[in-house]
Amino acid sequence: MLQARGLTKRYGGLTALDRVDFELHPGEIVGYLGPNGSGKSTTVNMVVGLLEPSAGSITLDGMTASQDPIAYKRRIGYVPEEPYLYAHLTASEYLTLVGRLREIPVKALEARITTLLQLFQLHDSRYKSMTAFSKGMRQRVLVAAALLHNPDLIVLDEPFSGLDVNAGLLFRTLLRLLADEGRMIFFSTHRFDMVEKLCSRVVVLSSGRVVLQQRVADFDRSGPDSLEETFSRVTAQVDYLPLARRIFDTIRRD
Amino acid sequence: MRDTPQRLLTRHFFTSLFDFGFLSDAGAESFKKLLLGVSAVAMALGLLLVRILALKYIGLARAGTPADYQRELTVDHAFLMAVPMWVVAFATVLVGHALFPDETDYRILTAQPVSRATIFRAKLLALLRFAALFVVGTHAALLLMLLITTFHRLAATNGIAMIVVFETVSFLASAFAALAIVALHGVLVLVAPRARLVGFSTLVRSTLVCVLVLSLPLLLRLPGTGATVARGAWWLPWTPPMWFVGFERWVLGLPGPTAAVAWYGIVATMIAAAIAAATYGVLYRNFDRVILRPESPHAPPRQARGWPTRRPVRRAILQFASITLRRSVLHQGIIVALAAVAAGFVVNAMLGTDVAPRRGRVAVARGASPWLVTWAPMVFMFIAVPAIRLALSIPLELRANWIFRMTEADRTRGDAIGAAVATTFWLGVIAPVAVLLPLQWTTLGPIAAPIAVVDALIGWLYVEILSQDWRRIPFTCSYLPGKTFLPQLVIKSVFGFFFFTGFGSLLGQFIAFVPAAALFAGAIIGATAAALLVRRRRTARHAPLVFEDQLPTDLNTLSLSGD
């Protein structure tokens, strides 16, 4: 189980994350929602061990990242928000690099890479450097890299950005399968539809604080108690119609 | 003044030519300071050069003949033309990736309401401005030297006329240097298959950098070749600055052996200009087809076979470093340029030394060649090892380093650092020793083998000494250039160079006399290097990897509060 207790991150005088608590159980997909700047990416970076909390803790089955960072990180697969990868490598070379860094036995690694490239429809492009890849193709490489070592916890930061409809559907189905097989999936996103279709629970963040934690099944499909309306309410979102009108007025002006 | 699209685009293309994409803001700031330091050193050397030239021409005015003056004038003007040619050529090679509108320009700019002609004109104007900056800058810097050579008691022509002709011809020479490189890149863009364009471009740029750096010692020797040129040296047709000096002298009506090559420069400039214009024209007419032509199928890149290893992290990083050095223009360029500096030293020494092969101990006692062949690997190692470390220090896709940060482990950290050290050792020590072994063998005979082994051990020790504080995975840490105070660095490098190359060369020659010494020296040096390796691996378990470079003046926070 992944457990965050009193998770706080301060940058000088700025508190990016303030006493955040949440849990993620095996077989669960938790959606992590919040407006821009609410602290989602800071949380993700702390969950994957790239940032240390200023206060509070994150434990994975009772083990904190600081106790044994290697054993902790070894159990995590991570798909970053932007496709940050070494684009001068080919997909196959990148996956080999990641697999070796994760110390996957050579024979298993080669077979796994070949199969994953085929399944993610990257096999035909395996000899091209990723500089020529679209964002969606790079995203698929990152997803394959995150799953390569069969992690217990999969952390996804906007994983669907750039994926086409087919790849998105495949990935969604795969995530559900992984959850059914007992993996924990932490899913940071802006997309309500994905949370509704995929997640069992949602954690909503606003200005660095958790403002809502609820089972997705408890939301209405539409109306004032739908996920979208509740989100707008708890994160104190403004009425966007006047803002949209002002933008329109600005571009209409000579 | 109103900003037209063309003016805006020209400014955009011009500033992007100075964009150090691999440096952070702090790194770029630090790099500017380093450039200021380098400029100061260059100015000091320039003033020294002016003084030397002034003394030479004062001497000629006192005791020389008009023929002596003309002889020296020819080679000094060749030198004064060669310097801007070299600077402009080097700058053009460095921005080789931006000489033509590329796929990014196509995708971003053609979607904007600007015509293709505007894009191309802006690109050309930016390049023109860029080249002009270097041409005018170097000519201004050399003006004092030009005045010293021109206004002279023994001069046969009017000084003002000579300066006007010189400057015109020298500008033409610099234009030739830039156009030749533009033409070469243009042909490459049009002819190379799209899938191989980056590879070819990397190769061509590295080769050009190598050729230019190697030509530096020859360029610096030009002012001393007066007598050879006066006799009509065989190399005149192969030396572009001589073509243009020949043309300058032809315009001024001055006779001399360079008259034979007077038209070479004009013809070469016309050919280069025609090819550059043609490639620009073809690209202009077929922008979309050339830029977006389908990647032709090609053989897959060589995949490193994965054999079972107990050190997969080391293997992963070795392969990552090797692929990056093969594909990155910047990283390869640094190594090639600095290795060419080493080659330049050796070539320079060879030009002043008898390199005829001789064998055995007698030759050691008699000739200069044994000194040269035992000195050369030391020079290469002394320069190549820091060059490779520098290349490995410069980041690539810095934000992609999260994968290394996520997989860092106490147990494998030694392997990760060891991979960087091994890359430095193989490229900076083994490669030069192996390349120079045949030359050593030809000169010294079979004793060259143990000398090469000892050379490699010295190189290993050198790599280990430099790597004791190394905490980086290649290309993954931000980089702040100019961390060391420049004069301190220069002094350290000069002393280090003389000590390292002198010691290595003396030891090599001693082994040639007393072969048994190889065993003794090898054992001591090898044991010391091995001890340092053990120490490095032990330290690596406790000291975390570094992903953010720091200036020595930066405060190290202890993070006691966890903030």
Image: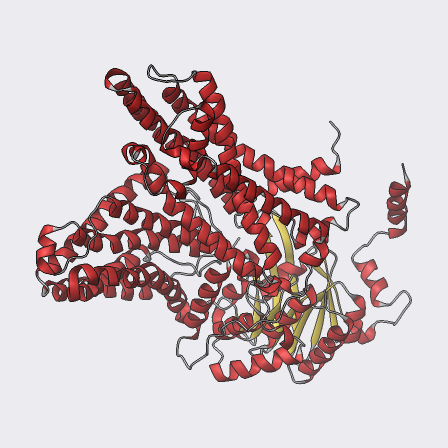
Residue A94 found in image quarter: bottom right
Q: Is residue B429 left or right of residue B360?
A: right
Q: Residue at x 53, y 61 (%)?
A: B199
Q: Position of residue B22 (x, y in %)?
A: 53, 50
Q: Is residue B548 left or right of residue A225?
A: left
Residue A219 found in image quarter: bottom right
Q: Quadrant of the N terminus of chain B?
A: top right
Is residue B395 something that shows in the picture? no
Q: From what the image shows, is residue B476 above or below residue A249?
A: below
Residue B546 found in image quarter: bottom left
Q: Tell which of B376 and B277 is nearer to you.
A: B277
Q: From what the image shows, is residue A74 above or below residue A88?
A: below
Q: Tell which of B237 and B402 is nearer to you.
A: B237
Is residue B431 something that shows in the picture? yes
Q: Position of residue B543 (x, y in %)?
A: 38, 61
Q: Position of residue A156 (x, y in %)?
A: 66, 69
Q: Tell which of A122 and B363 is nearer to you.
A: B363
Q: Residue at x 65, y 83 (%)?
A: A182
Q: Is residue B473 left or right of residue A56?
A: left
